[in-house]
Amino acid sequence: MLLSGKKVVIMGIRNKWSIAWGAAMSAYENGADVIFTYNNLENKDKIEALISEIPNSKAYSCDASSDESIEKCLEEIKNNHGKVDGILHSIAHANTEDLRNDFILTSREGFAHASDVSAYSLVAISRIAKQKELLNENASIVALTYYGSEKSIEGYNVMGVAKAALETSIKYLAKDLGKDGVRINAISAGPIKTLSAKGIKDFSTILNIVEEKAPLHRNVTTKDVGDTVSFLFSNMSNAITGEVIHVDNGFSTVGV
């Protein structure tokens, strides 16, 4: 199988409709041992019940806005599981009012919060994982982004700015991590009905437009994205790093 013998960490699991869960299921089906992290504000019992669907998986609490929490989490993972071969960064958050209101009304605090949790956390996780020697040689880090980083999308607002910072961070991280043979890439996923998407105004309209305009005339699924994560975790993507790969049925290629 594609990921036989590999251990991967899925950071940011929330529920079975999330992209993180689609990635976890794909990794498991492709032979990987799966480890999870979740925000400490999530219901631990619900997370434990969810991940029980994947045999031998375990979840660890991690506040991505705190270096101390990240260090503790990754240290626990290494102590209990040894080195890992892949990390999925599925972590993002913005204040509701900064998504509902015009972007020009974004507060300084809201801008900093979205950027910290959604973009800087990837830098912190990559650095701390490297410092703790958590990553095996030829390990792969994958982050999730969205087309709203490239074009203005109604209701995406400050999250689009944060995702743009995430994508640029990946280019610089690729250079630094490459010294140790570690790869890092992002997947720009088409819109999917996740819990986070509910915060975007008129989200259903976006789904309809993508289905109409995308060359393949359909919306993507968590399985579509999850399978691409598995590919990027695998040795089949050994020569790919620093890239943003669109998994959106070709929507981003359409001009009009």
Image: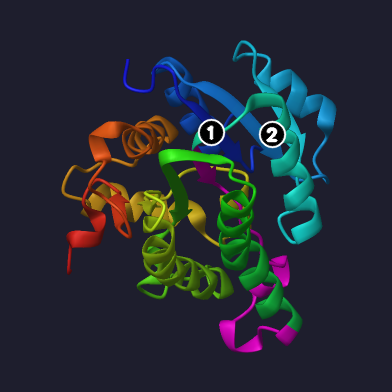
Tell me, yes or no, whether the highlighted magenta stretch contains residue 103: yes
Query: Magenta span covers which residues?
Result: 86-108
The relative height of residue 131 versus residue 77 in the rendered view (above or below) is below
Q: Which of the labelled discs sits on residue 154, or is there none?
A: none
Tell me, yes or no, whether the highlighted magenta stretch contains residue 64: no
Q: Amino acid at mark 2?
A: Ile
Q: Secondary structure at mark 1?
A: strand
Q: Secondary structure at mark 2?
A: helix
Q: Position of residue 215 (x, y in %)?
A: 16, 49
The relative height of residue 44 versus residue 141 in the rendered view (above or below) is above
Q: Position of residue 151 (x, y in %)?
A: 36, 74
The residue nearer to you, when weighing 134 against 165, is 134
Image quarter of residue 9: top right
Q: Position of residue 216 (x, y in %)?
A: 18, 42
Please rate how many residues cluster around mark 1, counting C-alpha atoms within 10 Å: few if below 14, some from 14 to 19, many from 20: many
Quadrant the C terminus occupies: bottom left
Q: Is residue 20 left or right of residue 215?
A: right
The relative height of residue 111 versus residue 40 in the rendered view (above or below) is below
Quadrant the N terminus occupies: top left
Q: Is residue 46 left or right of residue 56?
A: right
Q: Amino acid at mark 1?
A: Val
The residue depicted at 25 percent of the width and 60 percent of the height is 252
The residue depicted at 40 percent of the width and 49 percent of the height is 182
Q: Which of the labelled discs sits on residue 84, or is there none?
A: 1
Q: Is residue 137 left or right of residue 14?
A: left
Disc 2: which residue: 77
Asked whether the viewer can see residue 249, the reply is: yes
The residue depicted at 33 percent of the width and 37 percent of the height is 228
**Are dots 2 and 1 in contact, CB under 8 Å?**
yes
Q: Position of residue 147 (x, y in %)?
A: 37, 63
The residue nearer to you, when weighing 211 against 252, is 252
